[in-house]
Structures are given as C-alpha cells and as structure tokens.
Image (spheres, grey):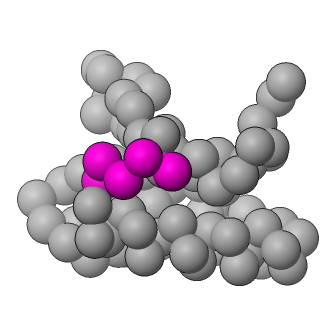
Amino acid sequence: MRPHFSERFIRSYETAPLHIQRAFDRKLDLLVANLRHPSLRAKKYDETRGIWQARVDGGWRFYFRVEGDVYQILDLVPHPK
C-alpha cells in the first residue's frame, strides 16, 4: 500500500503543530504496514463514502479512503472532545 495526499490534507498538515506532524509521520508508517495496527484504532467513519478514521494521538485524527493499493489521505484534524 502507498499513500496519496489530498490538497486539503497537505494544508492541514502544514498548519498542524510540529509534534503532531511527527506523530502523524509515525502513524502513516504503521498504516502503510498494517491497517489494523492497534495504536491506529482505525475504523470506518463514513460507510457510505468509504471514509476511515485513525488516531494520531489522544487529540488528533486523520481521515482516509482505501482505493485499491492506495491510501487516499484526506484530512488531519483536532478531535473534538
């Protein structure tokens, strides 16, 4: 599997704090290796549109689609509590 980044994600990533960028980079490596890695806590977020959600840390999430052998990374956002 390989990642592809949306324009929206790129803007979100660039404005995220540096420690979140680094945490996302580590989680992306885990995602590419194993969608079911326990620390990702990946789950279907929107079944109709095929969007998944995964955890960056306790306060941030990223959203993606699985399209063939590509992870379409859609966005990186703070998680509302």
Q: Is residue 34 above or below residue 59?
A: below
Q: Observer-nearest residue: 41 or 48?
A: 41
* Quarter of the picture holding the C terminus: top right
The overriding secondary structure of the stretch rendered in magenta is loop
Q: Position of residue 39 (x, y in %)?
A: 51, 51
Queried whether the magenta region covers residue 6, the answer comes back as no
Q: Position of residue 55 (x, y in %)?
A: 59, 47
Q: Is residue 3 above or below residue 9?
A: below
For residue 34, side relative to residue 5 (left or right): left
Q: Is residue 47 above or below residue 33?
A: above
- Residue visible at 36% across and 53% down in the picture: 37
Q: Position of residue 61 (x, y in %)?
A: 64, 46
- Residue visible at 36% across and 29% down in the picture: 44
Q: Quadrant of residue 9?
A: bottom right
- Residue visible at 37% across and 63% down in the picture: 31
Q: Observer-nearest residue: 65 or 30?
A: 30
* Quarter of the picture holding the N terminus: bottom left
Highlighted magenta segment, given as a residue range: 35-39
- Decide if residue 7 is in sight here: no
- Residue visible at 31% across and 70% down in the picture: 32
For residue 11, side relative to residue 72 (left or right): right
For residue 70, side relative to residue 49 (left or right): left
